[in-house]
Image (cartoon, rainbow, N blue to C red):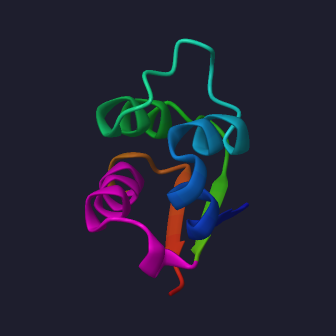
Amino acid sequence: MKLDGNLIKEMGHDYLKDALNFPDYYGKNLDALYDCLCEIGVETEIVLINGSEVSSDLIDTFIDAASENDFLKFRCES
């Protein structure tokens, strides 16, 4: 699955919620992102393109979740 840093920058958590098919109760913040990423229960690889367009905190959230969830792999491309 590819996520576009340009779209994250433009649309924020609304884009992430739709792209990652998060539930309606998704809190639209980094803590909620981490929680939902850690709940993924099927093999999932997320590739962030245009990663230079988003904050390092957002990228760190993906990295931290991937280190906690064996089903999740994350890669960032600038």
How would you classify the magenta stretch by its main secondary structure? helix
The percent position of residue 47, horizontal first and vertical second, equals 61, 70
69 is higher (above) or lower (below) than 54: above
Relative side of 76 to 59, left or right: right
54 vs 26: above or below:
below
Residue lying furthest top: 25
Image side of residue 43 versus residue 70, left or right: right
For the question of whether residue 47 can be seen, the reply is no
Q: Residue 77, percent across and down?
A: 54, 84
Picture quarter containing residue 62?
bottom left
Q: Is residue 33 left or right of residue 14?
A: left
Magenta stretch encompasses residue 58: yes
Residue 14, above or below 6: above
Q: In terms of image quadrants, where is residue 21?
A: top right
Q: Please provide the residue range marked out in magenta.
A: 50-66
Tell me the quarter of the picture where residue 30 sits: top left
* Residue 19 in the image: above or below residue 5: above
Q: Residue at x 38, y 30 (%)?
A: 35
- Which residue occupies 56% across, 79% down? 50
Find out whether residue 56 is within the magenta segment: yes
Q: Position of residue 46 (x, y in %)?
A: 61, 62
Q: Quadrant of the N terminus?
A: bottom right
Taking 26 as reference, is 4 left or right? Answer: right
> Which residue is situated farthest in the bottom direction here?
78
Residue at image coords 63%, 19%: 23
- Closer to the camera, 2 or 41? 2
Residue at (30% x, 55% y) in the render? 64
